[in-house]
Image (cartoon, grey):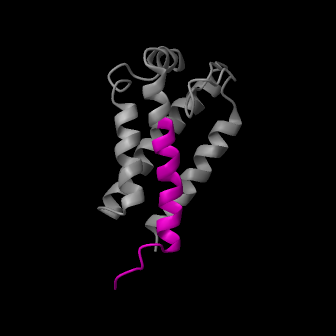
Amino acid sequence: MNEPMFSLNWWMAALVGVIFIFAGVQKFIARELWPAQAKRLGAPSFAIPTVPYIELVLGSLLIAGVAVNAVLVASIVALSSFTVLLTRRLVAGDRPPCACLSFRSTKPIGWNNIVRNLLMLALLVGALIR
């Protein structure tokens, strides 16, 4: 059965897609500043150059509604990995600036970052479970 393009599932996925695109664009605008912040956060060095591209591609595909289930699963995996990284830092007592959504942010990471990510994960899971 075909769903209308602008179903509730699409809106949930598209909202996260917009956030992913915004975050990816911010990382490109930051140039060399974002990779330095990502290193300080403890992101694996092999992943740092790919994160903005991953966010842009996944965000675009979420909005476009292309390969929906595969893109939702990939988005859940990506966002879960970001959330695990933040949680590990918080548990270790390390609170560097996140720069997750904007390189301009100098606020240290906090549990609010985890809550934000969990809300986005809930939207993605909700969009996946029809």
**Quarter of the image with the N terminus in it:** bottom left
Position above or below: 60 against 45: below
Estimate the x, y position of residue 101 in percent, counting from the top left: 56, 34
Q: Residue at x 45, y 23 (%)?
A: 43
Q: Residue at x 35, y 27 (%)?
A: 47
Magenta-highlighted residues: 1-23
| Extreme residue in the bottom direction | 1
Q: Quadrant of residue 3?
A: bottom left
Q: Is residue 10 visible?
A: yes
Estimate the x, y position of residue 77 in percent, counting from the top left: 41, 46
| Extreme residue in the front direction | 29
| 59 magenta-colored | no
Magenta span: predominant SS is helix
Numbered label tally: 0
In the drawing, does residue 35 fall left or right of residue 105?
Answer: left
Estimate the x, y position of residue 55 in percent, counting from the top left: 41, 40
Q: Residue at x 47, y 44 (%)?
A: 20
Q: Quadrant of residue 67?
A: bottom left
Q: Residue at x 37, y 48 (%)?
A: 58
| 11 magenta-colored | yes
Q: Is residue 124 visible?
A: no
Position above or below: 66 against 33: below
Position above or below: 102 against 14: above
Estimate the x, y position of residue 99 in percent, counting from the top left: 57, 26
Position above or below: 20 against 41: below
